[in-house]
Image: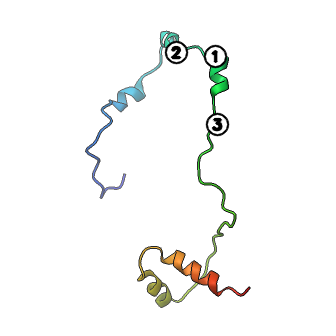
Amino acid sequence: MNASKRPSRRSLGSDLAKVAAHVIQLEEYDELPELTEDMLERGQVNKGGRPRSENPKKLISIRLPEDVIEKWRATGPGWQTRMAEKLVRATPK
């Protein structure tokens, strides 16, 4: 955890150390419901994440004069996106 950040006041209300240290006993397995074919049929696989872009960006390294970078940074958040958009418009077709 970052030393400069203060811990959140909100808590889960659980003793996580106690939960993590718990070892499941054999009799606890009897409390679990039986897995049925119906349960398996209703199961779904959810693929998370962002959809693939049709025009993905590629990471490159480019050396620019420091004053150019500072001027772009001074325009505020999103400066890299704005720079990329300007380069796209300037690209010969």
Left or right placement of residue 12 versus residue 56 in this view: left
Residue 8: x %, y % from top left: 29, 47
Determine the secondary structure under disc 2. loop
Q: Secondary structure at mark 3?
A: loop
**Quarter where residue 53 is shown:** bottom right
For the point 49% across and 84% down, the residue is 69
Measure the alpha-carbon separation of dots 1 and 2.
12 Å
Q: Position of residue 72 (x, y in %)?
A: 47, 84
Task: Look at the numbered discs 1 and 2 and tell me whether their residues touch, using CB distance below 8 Å.
Answer: no
Instruction: Tell me the tag on residue 32.
Output: 2
Looking at the image, which residue is at 67% across and 18% down? Answer: 37
Q: Earlier in the sequence, mark 1 or mark 3?
A: 1
The reply, left or right, for residue 89 in relation to residue 80 is right
In the image, residue 26 above or below residue 8:
above
Give residue 75's quadrant in the image.
Answer: bottom left
Query: In front here: 60 or 81?
Result: 81
Q: Nearer the viewer, residue 80 or 36?
A: 36
For label 3, the residue is: 45
Callout 3: 10 Å neighbours few (<14), some, many (20+)? few
Name the element at disc 1.
Answer: loop
Is 6 positioned to the left or the right of 91 in the image? left
Q: CA distance from mark 2 to mark 3?
A: 22 Å
> Compared with residue 91, is residue 27 higher up or lower down, i.e. above or below?
above
Give the amino acid type for the residue marked by disc 2 in the picture.
Leu
Of the 4 image quadrants, the one containing the C terminus is: bottom right
| Image position, residue 43 (x, y; %) | 63, 29
Mark nearest the camera among 2 and 3 is 3
Q: Residue at 36% of width from left, 31% of height from top? A: 17
Between 19 and 90, the one nearer to me in the picture: 90
Which residue, given by chain and number where applicable, does mark 1 sit on?
Answer: 36
